Image (cartoon, rainbow, N blue to C red):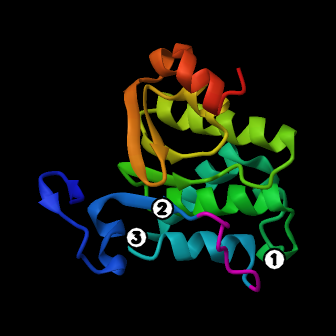
Amino acid sequence: MIRWKGREIQREPVDEIPAMGIGHVPEGRRIFPRLTVEENLDIGAYLVTDRKVVAQRKLSVFDLFPRLGERRKQDGGTLSGGEQQMLAMGRALMQDPELLLLDEPTLGLAPILVETIFETITRLNAAGKTILLVEQNAWHALQIAHRAYVLQTGSIVKEGPAKELAGDPAVQEIYLGG
């Protein structure tokens, strides 16, 4: 069962989820490759009727990801993998969600971009954004998370404060190479 604010939502139509305050950044980015950076961001704000608010949110995304501002007129499909990940995150942020779901945001990215994505996640959380992060890079995830769940074949095998799990010998051996 999946509950959000006391309401079961697992059977809700997917197009209604953003209106509930939930943003999603899917694994594999799934940007619109033939649309520009700005057009991709506009799609993320499809529920926002005030154009001034949309413009402000774009500026916030460009502040968070300056590279996107530089490439605002460029087609999304011509961006690097890291830039596409930034665009996917920016698109989700255009709705100003209360909860941001991030599915493998660093998958396939160069180490320097992995650092950038984790720094951004930390900044968003420090600014008050609630984030649910699914990430195979367990070491990085445990460094920034407040609470963690360790999954094995789809089942939770350990849970608790992230710092405790990072110090757990079994978690270190199996998931952190320690």
* Visible residue check, residue 29: yes
The amino acid at mark 1 is Gly
**Rendered residue at 47%/23% (across/down):** 162
Residue at label 1?
Answer: 77
Residue at label 2?
Answer: 24
Q: Is residue 30 part of the magenta span, yes or no?
A: yes
Disc nearer the start of the sequence (1/2): 2
Q: Find residue 48 and name its label.
A: 3
Circle 3 — which element?
Answer: loop
Circle 1 — which element?
Answer: helix
The amino acid at mark 3 is Val
The amino acid at mark 2 is His
Q: Main secondary structure of the magenta part?
A: loop
Residue neighbourhood size for the residue with mark 2, other residues' Cα within 10 Å, grouped as few (<14), some (14–19), many (≥20): many
Q: Find residue 96 and name its label.
A: none
Q: Quadrant of the C terminus?
A: top right
User: Nearer the observer, disc 2 or disc 3?
Assistant: 2
**Boundaries of the magenta span:** 27-34
Residue neighbourhood size for the residue with mark 3, other residues' Cα within 10 Å, grouped as few (<14), some (14–19), many (≥20): some
* Visible residue check, residue 75: no
- Residue 161 vs residue 138: left or right? left
In this view, the residue in front, 70 or 175, is 175
In this view, the residue in front, 148 or 144, is 148
